[in-house]
Image (tube, grey):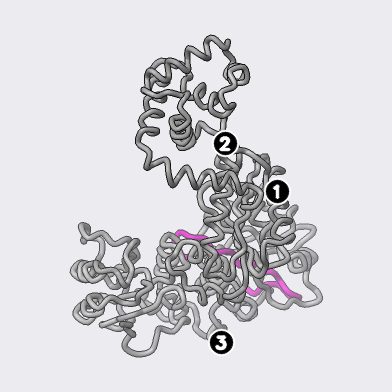
Amino acid sequence: MQLSPPGPPPSPDAAAHGGGSPTLGQAVGVVGPEVVEVLRAPCGTDVPVSGAGVFDEGETLQARGRILIAPGVDTSAPGAAGVLRAADRAGAAAVVLRRGAQGVAPSLAEAADEVSTALLARAPWIEWGELIGLLRAAIARTGSAAPAEASADVALGDLPGLALALAALVGGAITVEDPESNVLAYSPTADTADPLRRLTILGRRVPSWRVTELAESGFLTTLWASGDVVHRPADARFPERLAVAVRAGDEILGSLWAAADGEPLPSGARDALRQAAVIAVPHLLHHRLRSRSAASRRRYAVRALFEERPPDVSAAAAVLGVEAGQACTVLTASAGAPIAPDGLDRAFRLAALRVAAHHTPAFAHRDGDRLDVLVAGTGAGDGVDRLARDLAAVLRGAGVRPLVAVGPAVGGLGDAAASRAGAAQVLRVLRERGGPETAGAEDVRFAMDALRVTDAVAEHVPSAADAVAALLEHDERHGTDLPRTVAAHLVFFGDAAATARYVGVHTNTLRYRLRRAGELCGIDLTDPDVRLLVELGLRRAGLIPLP
């Protein structure tokens, strides 16, 4: 069952105009209906909102008039109705749930018809932390006194159109920058524009030497700390500048810079730039969301293919821009030796960049201490093998001992999880057995089969488990190295001289240890059945192959 809001959805430009307290419709309009969908709004979307927070059934004093997010609850969950009713009792303006794969639970639909609190659904590709930040930023931008006509014809997120409109409002040339001094948009400039503005526009960012000057002079510190327009006086090289930070609450979205363009800035330019900063908020919020959403959607699509059962293959294929029936292969990269978290983070970032540059569509997905790479549109041929070698080289260059496992090629995106599972098995072999930096299933076929046999059989052999447990317990208490001695004895087929050399003891000491092990465990290592079962137990414990 699906719900629909009563009447048309809120206008995305609603938050750019008007005065008074922000409304639910304005907040959703700024964040974007593709991020938060209004499923049901019994009181309409013009209800005022006072803030955003996290749903807590036991905490109601701070919930009135707020938009509450409910992490871990989706619209198809049985408990979703209880969350909505509790939020309504607390006086919340709205509650946001994750959009469930099974739609809206009947109990939630029934509750939505009986309460006053609006029900919203979060898109699956945006994280809760990012969503609450966007909501708070949107709400913090209350209705302003900025003239509506200044941006009435500018579509939300159209930054070049915004720059042109703000240039007309301020009476000078406008540059819109992000917090890292990259140019997001600029108004057309006259031939008389100063060299710095031309350099900034051509390079799409403020020249690094100019950023250093502004930082060392304290100008940037003042700009980001001040809530007002900051003046940069003219000097021997460049004319004056006016700059203002664009904020949504405590969050800095970017900055606006005004420069004289053929004639001096008018006397009212400072006041106009203050108004321009308010007008720019929803546009910069929307731009930031758009720039992040594509990457977020791809990450979600890959994660869904790997982890959801069953995955929505057609939706994932549409997001990734590939055919659902295309063959694909998964590579899994990891570190073969311990490494500091920041070092692994850096190595994986570099590896992800290499993946993005691959000649066929490839997508990286970080999962703890491993990086899974979905390579679409190809089988396990030279292209995949070359990418595996390239990833190993990138990790090695970043100071990581690389292990890159190649999963089997599968016939479509719906089987990507199977390829990933195969790559995980290969990676396990590389970690436990050693071997090359890169390998596929065929390269380690016998070792993989041995692991499968051990996994399938060892847990059903209590005698082997008991024997190995006794050896490990005795070794822990007395430091006698009996488990490794028995493992070496089995690996070297009972060759006393080879076993003694490996363990580093005299052959008489070896014989004593083996006899002692047999007495402790009640086993006879001359019996081939006993040797088979004990070897299974030692393999299960990771002592065979020999470390």
Residue denoted by label 2: 338
Total of numbered circles in the picture? 3
Q: CA distance from mark 1 to mark 3?
A: 48 Å
Residue 252 point in image, percent of width and height: 52, 61
Q: Quadrant of the N terminus?
A: bottom left
**Quadrant in the rendering for residue 233:** bottom right
Question: Few, some or many C-alpha atoms within 10 Å of disc 3 (few <14, some 14-19, many ≥20)?
Answer: few
Residue 255 image position (x, y, % from top left): 59, 64
- The residue at 43%/47% (across/down) is 456
Q: Is residue 435 above or below residue 351?
A: above
Q: Secondary structure at mark 3?
A: loop
- Tell me whether the residue at label 1 lies in contact with that at label 3, contact meaning CB atoms closer than 8 angstroms: no
Task: Note whether residue 47 is visible.
Answer: yes
Q: Residue at x 57, y 55 (%)?
A: 372
Q: Earlier in the sequence, mark 2 or mark 3?
A: 3
Q: Residue at x 37, y 23 (%)?
A: 521
Secondary structure found at label 1? helix
Give, as a three-letter code, the residue at label 1.
Answer: Val
Residue numbers of the magenta segment: 248-267
Q: Quadrant of the C terminus?
A: top right
Left or right position of 501 against 6: right
Residue at image location 47% in from the left, 78% down from the top: 16
Location of mark 1 (residue): 394
